[in-house]
Image (cartoon, rainbow, N blue to C red):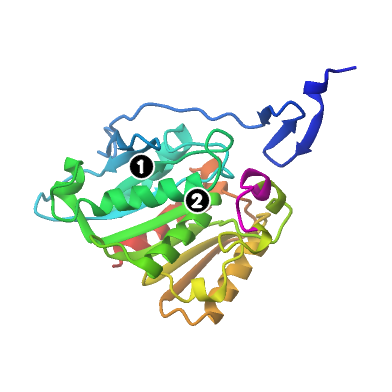
Amino acid sequence: MGSVGNEITHEFRFFRVHRDGRIEKFIPTHKIPPFNDPITGVQSKDVVISNKPPVSARIFLPRIIDTTRKLPVLFYIHGGAFCFESAFSPMYHKHVASLAAKANAIAVSVEYGLFPERPPPACYEDSWAGLQWIASHANGNGPEPWLNEHADLNRVFVGGDSGGGNISHTLAVRVGSIGLPGLKFIGAILVHPYFGGMEDDEMWLYMFPTSGGLEDPRLKPPAEDLSRLGCERMLIFFAENDHLRGVGGSYYEELKKSGWGGSMEVVEHRGEDHVFHLMKPDSENAVDLVNKFASFIVQD
């Protein structure tokens, strides 16, 4: 017989919980240092946004051809079910660097707190801190020279995939509710976003015991939140075979009915699964996703 500590009390899609409180994650998180890409010309570096709580980010600067031309800013929020992955992982480094290159935008990829070390709402609050940090560069005297010298804070976009898409929505609600002086939030990009209404809700509730339960607005956005999103445009990506396709579709339908005054675009990739573009980034549909994501930024 195994020890009491090895008994399983909860098992979810991405981790199990042992009776002694130990959390066993199924997917490891790998990190790599920033580097400059000689092919695309994208430079990257890591910055500290806050020490307490610990929040950092990886910034990507595309090749600068015209120093007088300011660039849009993409604030990117990685996925990972609020418990794994990183802005510093090889997969997200490659993806966000490709978006910076294709959109000719400065990308700030936030490294937020993960369960169990820093359970939700840390992911939401850390991401808000990151967006506030970007806004602190409004007068050209913020802590990061790349933003001071090259960023157009009248063209800020927020985007993310899976759980990061969920967090992106909450930031749009917060900007629409209380504002954020220093930047203009143009568009939100939700890629295969997570919302409530499926089996993973139990995992989210376990990670976030202080939440409002199944009716928590971060899990089930009410019409009043949807109607006051603080961006002008939204782009939502769906994958036909994604286990989150249903809840993402419900979000889109509710947003259409909410009275929000912005414009919406939807792109669906047939025959694809959840975050396929990260798993096979060189595939035809992954390239299409990056191109359409970038075009949404460039068209402003």
Q: Is residue 280 visible?
A: no
Observer-side mark, 2 or 1, equals 2
Per the image, label 2 sits on a secondary structure element best described as: helix
The stretch of residues the image draws in magenta is 204-212
In the rendered view, tell whether residue 257 sits above or below residue 210: below
Q: Residue furthest right?
A: 1
Q: Quadrant of the N terminus?
A: top right
Quarter of the rendering containing residue 253 = bottom right
State which quadrant residue 195 falls in: bottom right
Depth check, front residue: 200 or 296: 200
Rate crowding at label 2 as few (under 14), some (14 to 19) or many (20 or more) other CA atoms within 10 Å.
many
In the displayed orientation, state which residue is furthest to the front. Answer: 210
Who comes first in sequence, dot 2 or dot 1? 1
Q: Specify whether 244 is left or right of 160.
A: right
Q: Which residue is mark 1?
A: 97
* Residue at screen point 45% across, 41% down: 112
Q: Work out whether residue 9 can be spotted.
A: yes
In x, y percent, where is residue 165? 50, 55
Q: Position of residue 289 (x, y in %)?
A: 47, 55
Indicate which disc residue 164 carries: 2
Residue at 28%, 54% (x, y): give it: 73
Residue 152 in magenta stretch: no
Residue 116 on image: x %, y %: 59, 35
Image position, residue 258 (x, y; %): 53, 79
Q: Is residue 111 left or right of residue 271?
A: left
Secondary structure under the numbered disc 1 in the rendered image? helix
Circle 1 packing at 10 Å, graded few (<14), some (14-19), many (20+), is: many
Give residue 51's quadrant in the image.
top left
The residue positioned 67% from the left and 38% from the top of the image is 14
Q: Compute the Cα span from label 2 to label 1.
A: 17 Å
